[in-house]
Amino acid sequence: MKKRSIGLAAAGVLLLALTGCAAGGDAGGTGEGPKPLDELVVGFSQVGAESGWRTANTTDIQGAFEDAGIELKFSDAQQKQENQIKAIRSYIQQQVDVIAFSPVVESGWDAVLNEAKAAGIPVVLTDRAVDSADDSLYVSFLGSDFVEEGKKAGEWVVEEYADADDVKIVQLEGTTGAAPAIDRAEGFADVIGADDKFEIVASQTGDFTRAGGKQVTEALLKSNPDIDLIYAHNDDMGLGAIEAIEAAGLTPGEDIKIVTVDAVKDGMQALADGKINFIVECSPLLGEQLVEIVTQINDGETPEKRIVTEETTFTQEQAVEALPDRQY
Ligand code: GZL
């Protein structure tokens, strides 16, 4: 009897050791339960440094992991999907405990996410989503509801132009194929589409950058001299549009009104100065919630599949009030 029970116990330990790393909640892969936080390693692939929002997002995430004492391997993809795929593959090779990333575009991730799954490494999406049909490829999505953000911008436009007969709109789109660009356009169109007095006369990508917003606005002002409003998918493109409007001898916020998304400091300053008319907030402060998700995974818990961040909106008056306390 004794020999038999020792044999079974040994087999049990061997089985745990072999299957431990695939258990997800046993990040150590040794079948011994959660790792101490100072032994955890997380690989993070960031979109790039294209906007004030992105810089604030990077700073917040790096700070949160430093405060938590969890090692964060960080890579900047310079807005190229192939660089993010390379980084994720490198994290798989290094056998990190968790991979997190903000996908620059929605599509084209299934292959590399299946490689992470096969390696037993849980993946967390931050900020932007993927359009994969297989949601087992990631543990959680942490970020904003971009359709809702587009709707909030549209609702302000409907109210602002309640007495207007026709409103000509230029839309500055974010990065082509990116979830925030697709969804902010969808939400905005859903709201203004209810009244045909609103016409989007031109819609073009400025790639979420200030330079892109300026370049596209310069060109569109030439071909559409009677624009009433610019809807920019982020503050940085709105700030670029301000430069183009002023260069054309017009007054931003008056001759051409501007509504943007993000509410980063430079955008809020332009709002307070009357050069932007309304901003829908999109919080970049995801670091603490990402650390919480990683800790839950390490503890063998199952985080919520979708965690949407709390956000608000700002008028010019509200920006003057809020500016002194803005963290980013
Ligand atoms: C939104 C984020 C967007 C910001 C832009 O969550 O992905 O990317 O709105 C940033 O400023 O470039």
Image: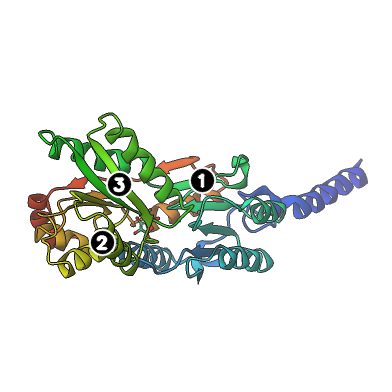
Which numbered mark, 1 or 3, is in the foreground of this view? 3
In the picture, which quadrant includes the N terminus? Answer: top right
Residue 174: x percent and y percent?
A: 38, 56
Q: Amino acid at mark 2?
A: Lys
- Secondary structure of the residue carrying numbered label 1: strand
Tell me if residue 192 comes above or below residue 111 in the rendering: above
Question: Is residue 235 shown to the viewer in this render?
Answer: no
Residue at mark 2: C-beta within 8 A of ligand 1: no
* 52 on left or right of 22: left
Q: Which residue corresponds to the image point at 60% horizontal and 60% vertical from the top-left?
A: 97
Front-most of residues 276 and 309: 276
Quarter holding residue 67: bottom left
* 201 on left or right of 126: left
User: Would you name the residue on which mark 2 appears?
Assistant: 222
Q: Gap in Å between the C-alphas at discs 1 and 3? A: 38 Å
Identify the disc placed on residue 201. Answer: 3
Decide which of tag 1 and tag 2 comes sooner along the chain: 1
User: Would you name the residue on which mark 1 appears?
Assistant: 140
- Secondary structure of the residue carrying numbered label 3: strand
Q: Which residue corresponds to the image point at 53% horizontal and 66% vertical from the top-left?
A: 80
Query: Local crowd at mark 1 within 10 Å, few (<14), some, or many (≥20)?
Result: many
- Ligand 1, by image quadrant, is bottom left
